Image (spheres, rainbow, N blue to C red):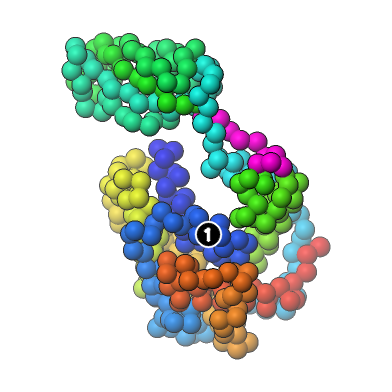
Amino acid sequence: MKKFAVIALAAVLSMTMLTGCGNSKKAAEATTEVKEETVDYSKGLNADGTLEGVKASDYVTVCDYSSLKIAKKDIEVSDSDVQSQIDSILSNYKKQVTDRKVKKGDVVNIDYTGTIDGKEFDGGSATGANLTIGSGTFIDGFEDQLIGKKPGETIQVKVTFPKDYTNADVAGKDAVFETKINYIEEEQKLTDQFVKENLADSYGVTSAKEMKKKIKEEIYKSNKTDYIWNHMIEKSTFKEIPDQLINDRIDVLVDGLKAELKSSNYSLKDYLSAYGIEDEDALREQYKSSCESTVKVFLVADAIAAEKKIAVTDNDIKEYFNGEDTAQYEKLYAKPYLNRVVLNDLVLKEIEKTTTVK
């Protein structure tokens, strides 16, 4: 289940990572796994990034944003917010340890093959599986037999399936799992050395202190951006939005999820089953509310852009990506989506001109 949660998050991030404007290189790294499966991120967008087939002002009356005030407490960043982001980053840099014994609480990577009366059975084998010792994830007694063993060892783990086990074919039977411990997975710590070796290029920092400051700034900016767009949606007046606009955004989310699942050798059917979602239509219904909010943001941004004569130029895109070569992003997302992201950012800056934080 956790694996599917990570995949679902990756699919969403692959659509939204660029909109943060914080670090385009991180966006590229986050989306490399979905390149093999084509996702039309620019679906429903004109070449300039605006919504296709509609005039924004026909569907939204934009609220007055000439003196938007934000209470500092509503967007402030706590130490726990920063630490959560650090933990998330460090989770991508696990250290593989092979020179000590397994203890309770360790995450071990194992290969195992299960047999009953000398014969393998369905669902009893895996390669490269991560297991937290003491989590109770596996059958009673399995995890305890790995404690005190070292990576590289192969253990004959003997267990008995519960009589009420969900698979009736193995319920109540004795089994032996030939289990090889590949390595122990350890969390990294945010040190100056770690930052220099792993994060300096992506984040433009060289110390743990700078990294924490960078993260705090990014979270603050994200909180402020979210507050402004939520305010604009809540205070603006919308007419009934055409279903096609919302469906286009849902299509992109679903296609992105399918691509992420495929890159991890899973199918949408596997995902739906894991989360108890009836079918793809039910999944689309779950996405509907967030996609409607996305469309509302686009409509507000398009209406303001039309009124203020804001249009995206190549220089705007270059500036957004901090002077990077944007060919890789254009290949992945296509130019209309890049224009969409940058247009939102330009409109946001227009709103921020008269926004105060106190």
Q: Which percent across, then down, holds residue 32? A: 44, 56
Secondary element at tag 1: helix
In the rendered view of the protein, which quadrant contains the C terminus? Answer: bottom right
Please tell me which residue is depicted at 37% across the width and 17% down the height of the picture: 154
Q: Which percent across, then down, holds residue 156? A: 33, 12
Residue type beneath disc 1: Ala
The reply to whether residue 316 is in sight is: yes
Q: Is residue 50 above or below residue 12?
A: below
Q: How many marks?
A: 1
Of residues 136 and 195, which is closer to you in this image?
A: 195
The reply to whether residue 104 is in sight is: no
Q: Is residue 300 above or below residue 197?
A: below
Question: Where are the magenta residues, as a range?
Answer: 185-194
**Horizontal relation, residue 331 to residue 83: left or right:** left
**Horizontal relation, residue 173 to residue 11: left or right:** left
Please tell me which residue is depicted at 53% across the width and 42% down the height of the picture: 92
Residue hosting label 1: 27
Of residues 260 and 211, which is closer to you in this image?
A: 211
Q: In the picture, residue 91 is in which quadrant?
A: top right
